[in-house]
Image (tube, rainbow, N blue to C red):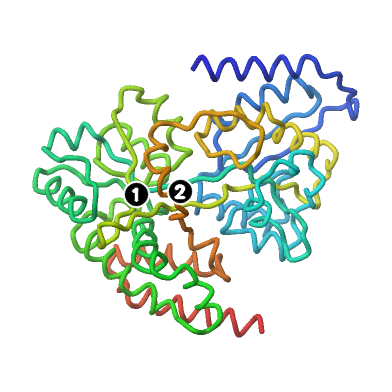
């Protein structure tokens, strides 16, 4: 808390030293569709308000991932896209093809931005559609207190992990808390450990027509159904939860495991500073194989049709300054992809740094040629499997059919 306060004071002091000539006599309101909430961004917004009192930020929060994508697409369809918005792996193709974002290549801090983050959000013409300041990873957060109370050592491999869930169930303890939008996360974990770990060029081979999703997703799907669905680890009640409810349930000690990411640690520490928790990778059936979900973080974009382009650029320049990014990192626990900024990595996130540093991280949405369409099938398909409407094999078949459909439409 002291460190966060010091960062905030630094930002406010910086703001007080900036001499600003108002762009207009009247107050300008910038709308900002974000998937970081008010708590995360408020210190930066307060500092910006002190520096630019004539610019008001109307923050509109939509939780990632599916709630955000739904809100983004609704605003696009109604021609009401906000002045600033978030571009993620799941909607970047839409942003590029729709021409929704201005080119940020000349933004000062781009010179310090990592190459992977630049390439992730650059279109075929080299236009940078979003500034993504960090990288992230996600895997399994565990409540050590619950494990200890049930005589379970922190798992170190697949066999121990599966056994831990069976023990918890036998003791009447919920092994997991999921929400509607992350039911497929363990499935992605199995894709990493059973397919990508064996062939890092798998997705490229699918796009070249050499392999299919049935080739690489059938085994992971069967494992996911066996270990999470048939076993009852994912209950239908998860379909009624959103991301905030899910993480709050974990914070309150209602389950031993949940999907945890770099951006969750600050909220967990603030809401339950006494929680003894940690992070595990996704375990492969080969006990030596361990991966994490990960990619370049989401990026901030400026609406190409914003009525306040100068003010929007001022805000983004402030948002991407060294001081603001240091505060952003402290608030989110992310892994900055911007050089020249010192920060500490949260001890829970440190637990899976070996996987990240070894390059054992993956996100289908980054590697898929048709990430938006396939992502919708994966999300809806996982929910349908949990409800008993579809089988895992049918979901994988739908992925191949959608790929063929998209390929035919784009060739």
Let me know if residue 39 appears in the view.
no
Q: Which structural element holds mark 1?
A: loop
In x, y percent, where is residue 74?
62, 56
Q: How many marks on residues? A: 2
Q: Which residue is mark 1?
A: 281
Q: CA distance from mark 2 to mark 1?
A: 10 Å
- Comes first in the chain, label 2 or label 1: 1
Quadrant of residue 227 in the image?
A: bottom left
In x, y percent, where is residue 367?
54, 65
Disc 1: CA contacts within 10 A as few (<14), some (14-19) or many (>=20): many
Q: Is residue 6 above or below residue 378?
A: above
Judging depth in this view, the residue of 167 and 46 nearest the camera is 167
Q: Which residue is mark 2?
A: 356
Judging depth in this view, the residue of 135 and 11 nearest the camera is 135
Q: Residue at x 83, y 41 (%)?
A: 308
Q: Residue at x 59, y 53 (%)?
A: 88
Judging depth in this view, the residue of 9 and 33 nearest the camera is 9
Disc 2: CA contacts within 10 A as few (<14), some (14-19) or many (>=20): some
Q: Is residue 169 above or below residue 331?
A: below
Q: Residue at x 80, y 34 (%)?
A: 314
Quadrant of residue 15 in the image?
A: top right
Q: Residue at x 19, y 35 (%)?
A: 146
Query: In the visual, does 142 lie left or right of 304?
Result: left
Let me know if residue 336 appears in the view.
yes
Query: In the visual, does 144 lie left or right of 166?
Result: right
């Amino acid at each position: 808390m002291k460190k966060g306060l010091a960062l905030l004071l630094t930002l406010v002091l910086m703001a007080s030293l900036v001499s600003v000539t108002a762009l207009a006599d009247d107050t300008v309101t910038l709308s900002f569709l974000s998937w970081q909430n008010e708590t995360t961004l408020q210190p930066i917004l307060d500092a910006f308000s002190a520096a630019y009192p004539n610019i008001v930020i109307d923050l509109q929060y939509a939780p990632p991932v599916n709630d955000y994508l739904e809100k983004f697409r609704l605003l696009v369809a109604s021609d009401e896209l906000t002045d600033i918005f978030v571009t993620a792996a799941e909607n970047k193709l839409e942003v590029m093809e729709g021409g929704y974002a201005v080119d940020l290549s000349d933004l000062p801090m781009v010179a310090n931005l990592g190459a992977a983050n630049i390439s992730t959000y650059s279109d075929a013409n080299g236009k940078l559609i979003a500034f993504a300041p960090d990288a992230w990873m996600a895997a399994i957060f565990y409540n050590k207190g619950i494990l200890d109370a049930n005589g379970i050592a922190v798992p170190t491999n697949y066999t121990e992990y599966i056994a831990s869930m069976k023990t918890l169930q036998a003791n009447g303890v919920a092994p997991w808390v999921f929400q509607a939008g992350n039911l497929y996360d363990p499935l992605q974990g199995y894709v990493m450990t059973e397919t990508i770990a064996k062939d890092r060029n798998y997705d490229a081979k699918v796009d070249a027509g050499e392999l299919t999703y049935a080739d690489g997703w059938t085994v992971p799907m069967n494992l996911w159904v066996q270990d999470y669905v048939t076993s009852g680890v994912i209950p239908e009640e998860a379909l009624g939860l959103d991301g905030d409810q899910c993480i709050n349930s974990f914070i309150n000690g209602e389950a031993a495991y949940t999907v945890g990411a770099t951006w969750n640690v600050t909220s967990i520490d603030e809401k339950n500073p006494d929680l003894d928790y940690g992070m595990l990778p996704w375990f492969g059936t080969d006990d030596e194989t361990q991966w994490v979900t990960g990619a370049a973080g989401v990026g901030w974009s400026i609406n190409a049709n914003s009525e306040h382009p100068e003010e929007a650029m001022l805000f983004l320049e402030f948002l991407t300054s060294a001081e603001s990014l240091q505060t952003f990192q402290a608030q989110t626990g992310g892994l900055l992809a911007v050089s020249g900024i010192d920060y500490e990595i949260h001890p829970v996130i440190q637990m899976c740094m070996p996987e990240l540093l070894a390059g054992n991280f993956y996100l289908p949405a980054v590697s898929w040629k048709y990430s938006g369409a396939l992502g919708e099938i994966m999300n809806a398909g996982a929910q349908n499997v949990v409800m008993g409407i579809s089988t895992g094999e049918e979901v994988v078949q739908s992925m191949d059919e959608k790929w063929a459909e998209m390929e035919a439409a784009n060739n």
